[in-house]
């Protein structure tokens, strides 16, 4: 079973008020993750497989595993598509979460994961460009 | 690094802040070795053109600008006009920035090693960090910051061809790297208010941020920043950084008595300097009472609605993080602490713009009295 990890350092994120704000530095897109998506994100922070994420959420919300799996699988697929997570490399099957664990609220009711995407920073990046340098180093002396 | 000495600037009021503790440079690396070469390039430039110094007060700390000759002063100093002064009482500068260009000095920086480039979907950029040393090159500029040792270098090819947005926010990458080292958040937001309290206005292009800050300025509110400010997160205190304002040309034309552009109509936006057009409206800093997230509604009435910390972070962090190279996760962490400390509101802008400043003033007043 593939394990996933957050795509650091290209992706930075923070948890506040039970929601995740994640920014993809490569694309300029940024995201709000809410509902059970926050829990899924926090589990993947420490690297986890889809089954492990599902099991953790089923345990937390006392919801049947099949019901959780039905929403976790497409949610992780969205995170992969957006480049927010990736298949983990070099991590063992029992790696512990590195940035927090599931939220500690035993009374929490399950709500499906939500991923909200924002792309309105593109104009800003075009106005203040930071990306016109040669990959061969700086400055590109060969071209001079 | 050794920097040449020079004459001090004119006298200005000071705020006494202890200089930061200095540390030795970390172990050698290709990146660290290369910046010695950049320093040698700056020294060669000063040998050609001489040294002119200015001291500015950034977030209560003395920062010294050392220009290799006069050429770059018109591109860099105006946006810091309101912060220039004599800060000898503060002792050793927290940061000394060596500044030069090749066109006037004939000296270019040594090439940097190619192994630090980062390639994102937007294209390659050169960025390296190593134990508190930051090297960033982009848009034809080179920025080297050794914040722990209080040293930085900034280079552009030609002082006469500095882009308008760099003149509006000079040394942005240098200040960003230095600020992170001093637990200051470099935030992309407008800041309006009074010395005893104010607000940040944050949001993407088209959110109404510029409209709101312009309306507040016209109504007499003080101004600590149009685009970028430094925020002491632990004290929730905003420090002014630049006296410049970037405006759409049509906004400038609509308020001809408020601002005069200092740049060409060929540029994408107008740049104005409040230090020239209305220095009495500049506020050097204020306690941060709230974060306002403007949004255009089309309704008549302007009102504020409480926003969650998560929405505040969404409004504040992406543009700040995406515009600034490096230290992204610590910067996001600092802004998270800020939104957890300071209340946030959605500022639902009505069609009657003249009513907006009163709403902003009421937020400041109500939160000041709490």
Image: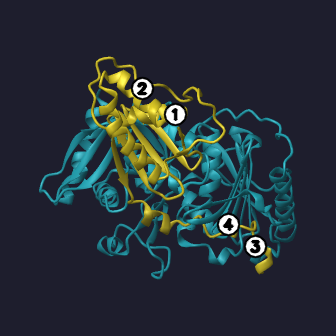
* Marks 3 and 4 on same chain: no
Chain of the residue displaying label 4? B
Residue B175 point in image, percent of width and height: 62, 51
Q: Is residue B288 left or right of residue B68?
A: left
Q: In this view of the protein, can residue A23 be seen by the observer?
A: yes
How far apart marks 2 and 1 lie (CA) works out to 10 Å
The mark tally for this picture is 4
Q: Nearer the viewer, mark 1 or mark 3?
A: 1
Q: Is residue B287 left or right of residue B183?
A: left
Q: Which chain is yellow?
A: A
Chain B colour in the picture: cyan
Name the element at disc 1.
Answer: strand
Residue at image point 22% right, 48% down: B358
The chain containing the residue under callout 1 comes to A
Q: Earlier in the sequence, mark 1 or mark 3?
A: 1
Give me the disc on residue B141.
4
Picture layout, residue B299 above or below residue A98: below
Few, some or many C-alpha atoms within 10 Å of disc 3 (few <14, some 14-19, many ≥20)? Answer: some
Q: Chain of mark 2?
A: A
Front disc: 2 or 4:
2
User: Could you give the CA–CA distance between mark 2 and mark 4, rounded to whole angstroms?
Assistant: 49 Å
The alpha-carbon separation of the residues under discs 1 and 3 comes to: 42 Å
Q: Chain of mark 3?
A: A
Q: Residues within 10 Å of mark 1 (few under 14, many from 20)?
A: many
Query: Residue beneath label 3, please?
Result: A140
State the image quarter where residue B248 is shown.
bottom left
The secondary element bearing badge 2 is classed as: helix
């Amino acid at each position: 079973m593939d394990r996933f990890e957050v795509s650091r350092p290209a992706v930075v994120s923070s948890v506040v008020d039970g929601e995740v704000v994640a920014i993809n530095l490569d694309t300029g897109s940024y995201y709000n993750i809410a509902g059970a998506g926050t829990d899924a994100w926090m589990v993947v922070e420490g690297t986890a497989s889809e089954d492990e994420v599902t099991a953790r959420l089923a345990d937390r919300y006392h919801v049947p595993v099949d019901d959780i799996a039905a929403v976790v699988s497409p949610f992780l697929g969205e995170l992969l598509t957006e480049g927010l997570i990736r298949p983990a490399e070099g991590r063992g099957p029992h790696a512990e979460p590195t940035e927090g664990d599931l939220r500690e609220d035993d009374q929490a009711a399950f709500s499906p994961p939500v991923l909200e995407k924002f792309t309105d920073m593109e104009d800003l990046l075009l106005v203040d460009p930071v990306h016109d340098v040669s990959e061969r180093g700086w400055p590109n002396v060969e071209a001079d | 690094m050794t920097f040449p000495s020079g004459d001090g600037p004119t006298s200005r009021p000071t705020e006494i802040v202890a200089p930061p503790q200095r540390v030795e440079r970390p172990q050698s690396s290709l990146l660290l070795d290369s910046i010695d070469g950049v320093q040698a390039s700056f020294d060669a430039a000063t040998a050609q053109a001489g040294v002119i110094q200015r001291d500015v007060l950034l977030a209560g700390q003395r920062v010294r600008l050392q220009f290799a000759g006069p050429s770059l002063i018109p591109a860099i100093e105006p946006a810091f006009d309101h912060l220039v002064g004599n800060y000898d009482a503060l002792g050793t500068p927290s940061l000394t920035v060596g500044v030069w260009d090749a066109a006037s000095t004939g000296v270019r920086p040594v090439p940097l090693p190619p192994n630090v480039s980062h390639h994102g979907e937007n294209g390659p950029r050169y960025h390296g960090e190593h134990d508190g040393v930051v090297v960033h090159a982009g848009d034809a500029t080179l920025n080297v910051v050794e914040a722990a040792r209080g040293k930085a270098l900034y280079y552009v090819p030609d002082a006469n061809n500095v882009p308008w947005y760099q003149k509006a926010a000079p040394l942005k990458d240098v200040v960003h790297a230095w600020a992170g080292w001093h637990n200051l958040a470099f935030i992309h937001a407008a800041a309006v208010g009074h010395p005893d309290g104010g607000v940040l206005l944050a949001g993407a292009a088209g959110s109404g941020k510029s409209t709101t800050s312009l309306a507040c300025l016209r109504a007499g509110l003080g101004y600590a920043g149009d685009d970028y400010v430094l925020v002491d997160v632990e004290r929730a205190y905003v420090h002014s950084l630049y006296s410049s304002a970037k405006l759409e040309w049509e906004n400038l034309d609509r308020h001809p008595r408020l601002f005069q552009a200092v740049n060409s109509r060929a540029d994408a936006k107008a740049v104005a300097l409040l230090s020239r057009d209305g220095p009495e409206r500049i506020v050097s800093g204020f306690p941060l009472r709230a974060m306002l997230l403007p949004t255009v509604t089309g309704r008549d009435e302007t009102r504020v609605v409480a926003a969650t910390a998560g929405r505040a972070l969404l409004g504040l962090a992406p543009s700040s993080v995406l515009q600034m190279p490096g230290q992204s996760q610590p910067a996001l962490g600092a802004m998270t602490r800020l939104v957890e400390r300071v209340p946030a509101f959605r500022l639902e802008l009505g069609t009657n713009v003249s009513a907006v400043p009163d709403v902003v003033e009421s937020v400041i007043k109500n939160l000041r009295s709490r």
